[in-house]
């Protein structure tokens, strides 16, 4: 019998026998990239006789692709719902494991009921900010009602979809690409990453989407901490696309009349932001003309990113505070000067990025510590900053390569974020830092300035948190826009944190399942380091660009260069409560 003749018969049979009862729930399943269907312009109809629970599940799967106004997902909606569905915003991202269950009252409905309510259950992961496409982490359970009804063919369709678009992490990562925009720190001598996410299809349009985000400026969480050399009125003169000679042309407008130095910084910001999405040379234009007379086309080696300012030199191998002394990670020997003899009873310490300066926390009594600051290998000056406890110090970068930073931070008694500033005359002052936005999270046990000085990573009540560092024209400093990272995985078990790169953190925990992890600053991606040889809790961790990660547990000091590496024991044998650190 032909399919055309069979279809009316099936409809009659369904009407006589009643539609099959829907299952009581769909079991949560992890969805990977292979689970998601590819959206097309003419989206196929849902599978025939799909029950209500699986209809909602497949709707979430189809929502992964924004192509043709979410055509694949709209196929699961009633005609009226297609008109009313609000899908113009950015997606909400949920865990790969989710379920669809009926509401308790649905069990009393007859098998041939025309309407039902399905609950979409899972865990929130985050969302994209609608104004700048940056990732905002969210947590907590997801329980969203979805109303479904039968159409005139007896097929379930969604009549009241959830507002917005819900996609799983796996499907989000398949359809969206992480791109890294770059802006300047306040001194405009270092380019700083500001990650975003753009829709992949079509891939040829990604450079244009990156350019559109770049001219809008820093993300909302980093405004005041980062600065765009393009200025607040920047626009796009014409679409970013490949020219006939193979160069990627970026044509900007409304930049005013920038100086030659500013033109180079503009080019550096544009080129650095596009390097991750093109292998072509990049031609930066201003109103159709090359932006700099010195160079027509740019590659990575042609720009100054300030990387040398924020990267410790190879000669500075790092240190560990153990037994009241500072020991060198190079050979385990005591560091020269009073910090290495035990005279200061050192609890923790930090080295300036150029290696010439030290800051240590010195215990002076059972419930009293002081900070000491000064040139390495020489007596250190005590800072008038009374405290019972201090977090290990952290240094701000210097203004030029080889110049020590003039500012070092710590947290006093878990609550007051303090900085010690050295004046040109050598005096030490402690101007305040506004950390009110961090106060609701609890006591601070660890704080690390990013080596570019624009962010802080903190351990607050055992939670990993990152915040922006906003510097005012009056030299005031405030910590803004705090965000928890991977709180659902790490909980309140984080013990230590450090910066592996400008946009990557390494954290140690008390969890045997995740003793050391690597986390992107947007919080979406987390990777677990190999657990071999480590014993939780891992009380201290140190990281830096191009250096192995160092970790301290109660059995000793360990190092690993990559997440999959087996941890190697060190010849340095510190105490279990030691603090390990690299310059910064």
Image: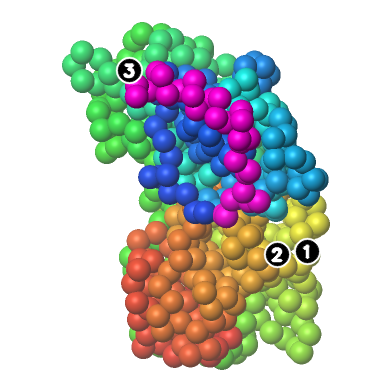
Nearest the camera: 581 or 61? 61
Which residue extends farthest left? 245
Instruction: Confirm or deny contact between disc 1 and disc 2 (CB under 8 A).
Output: yes
Residue 557 image position (x, y, % from top left)? 44, 83
Name the residue at 47% across, 41% down: 171
**The quarter of the displayed image where residue 339 is located:** bottom right
Alpha-carbon distance for marks 1 and 2? 6 Å
Circle 2 SS class: strand
| Highlighted range, magenta | 1-28
Residue count near mark 2 (Cα–Cα under 10 Å), binned few <14, some 14–19, many ≥20: many
Q: Quadrant of the N terminus?
A: top left
What numbered label is drawn on residue 442?
1
Instruction: Confirm or deny contact between disc 2 and disc 3 (CB under 8 A).
Output: no
Alpha-carbon distance for marks 3 and 1? 49 Å
Alpha-carbon distance for marks 2 and 3? 45 Å
Residue 4 lies in the magenta-colored region: yes
Decide: is 369 above or below 404. below
- Tell me which numbered mark, 3 or 1, is placed earlier along the sequence: 3
Name the residue at 63% across, 60% down: 488
Decide: is 35 above or below 329. above
Name the residue at 54% across, 82% down: 536
Residue count near mark 3 (Cα–Cα under 10 Å), binned few <14, some 14–19, many ≥20: some
Q: Is residue 282 left or right of residue 28?
A: left
What numbered label is drawn on residue 235?
none
Q: Which residue has dot 2 on it?
A: 460
Circle 3 SS class: strand
């Amino acid at each position: 019998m032909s399919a055309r003749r069979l279809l009316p018969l099936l409809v009659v049979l369904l009407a006589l026998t009643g539609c099959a009862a829907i299952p009581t729930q769909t079991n949560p399943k992890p969805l990977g990239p292979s689970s998601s269907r590819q959206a097309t312009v003419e989206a196929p109809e849902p599978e025939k006789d799909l029950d209500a629970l699986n209809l909602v599940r497949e709707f979430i799967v189809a929502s992964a692709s924004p192509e043709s106004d979410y055509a694949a997902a709209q196929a699961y909606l009633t005609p009226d719902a297609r008109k009313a569905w609000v899908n113009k915003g950015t997606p909400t991202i949920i865990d790969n494991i989710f379920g669809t269950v009926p509401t308790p009252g649905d069990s009393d409905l007859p098998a041939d009921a025309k309407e039902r309510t399905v609950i979409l259950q899972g865990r929130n992961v985050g969302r994209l900010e609608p104004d700048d496409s940056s990732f905002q982490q969210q947590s907590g359970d997801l329980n969203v009602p979805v109303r479904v009804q039968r159409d005139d063919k007896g097929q379930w369709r969604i009549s009241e979809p959830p507002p917005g678009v819900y996609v799983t992490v796996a499907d989000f990562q398949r359809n969206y690409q992480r791109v890294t925009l770059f802006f300047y720190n306040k001194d405009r001598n270092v380019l700083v990453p500001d990650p975003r996410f753009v829709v992949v299809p079509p891939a040829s349009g990604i450079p244009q989407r990156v350019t559109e985000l770049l001219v809008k400026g820093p993300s909302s969480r980093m405004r005041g901490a980062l600065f765009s050399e393009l200025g607040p009125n920047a626009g796009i003169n014409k679409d970013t696309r490949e020219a006939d000679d193979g160069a990627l042309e970026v044509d900007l407008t409304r930049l005013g009349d920038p100086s030659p130095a500013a033109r180079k910084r503009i080019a550096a910001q544009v080129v650095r932001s596009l390097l991750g999405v093109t292998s072509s040379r990049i031609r930066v234009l201003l109103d159709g003309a090359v932006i700099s007379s010195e160079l027509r086309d740019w590659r990575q080696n042609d720009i100054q990113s300030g990387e040398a300012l924020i990267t410790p030199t190879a000669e500075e191998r790092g240190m560990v505070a153990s037994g009241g002394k500072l020991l060198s990670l190079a050979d385990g020997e005591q560091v020269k000067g009073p910090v290495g003899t035990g005279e200061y009873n050192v609890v923790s310490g930090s080295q300036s990025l150029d290696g010439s300066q030290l800051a240590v926390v010195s215990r002076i009594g059972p419930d009293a510590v002081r900070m000491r600051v000064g040139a390495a290998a020489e007596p250190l000056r005590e800072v008038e900053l009374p405290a019972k406890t201090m977090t290990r110090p952290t240094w701000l970068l210097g203004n030029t390569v080889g110049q020590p930073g003039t500012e070092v931070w710590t947290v006093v008694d878990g609550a007051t974020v303090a900085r010690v500033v050295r004046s040109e005359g050598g005096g030490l002052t402690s101007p305040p830092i506004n950390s009110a936005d961090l106060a609701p999270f609890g006591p601070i046990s660890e704080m690390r300035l990013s080596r570019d000085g624009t962010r802080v990573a903190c351990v607050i009540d055992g939670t990993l948190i990152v915040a922006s560092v906003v510097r005012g024209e009056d030299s005031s400093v405030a910590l803004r826009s705090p965000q928890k990272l991977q709180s659902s995985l790490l909980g309140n078990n984080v013990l230590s944190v450090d910066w592996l790169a400008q946009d990557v953190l390494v954290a140690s925990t008390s969890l045997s399942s995740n003793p050391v992890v690597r986390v992107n600053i947007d919080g979406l991606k987390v990777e677990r380091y190999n657990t071999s040889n480590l014993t939780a809790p891992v009380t201290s961790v140190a990281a830096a660009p191009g250096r192995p990660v160092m970790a301290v547990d109660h059995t000793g000091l360990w190092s690993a260069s990559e997440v999959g590496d087996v941890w190697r024991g060190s010849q340095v044998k510190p105490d279990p409560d030691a603090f390990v650190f690299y310059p910064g």
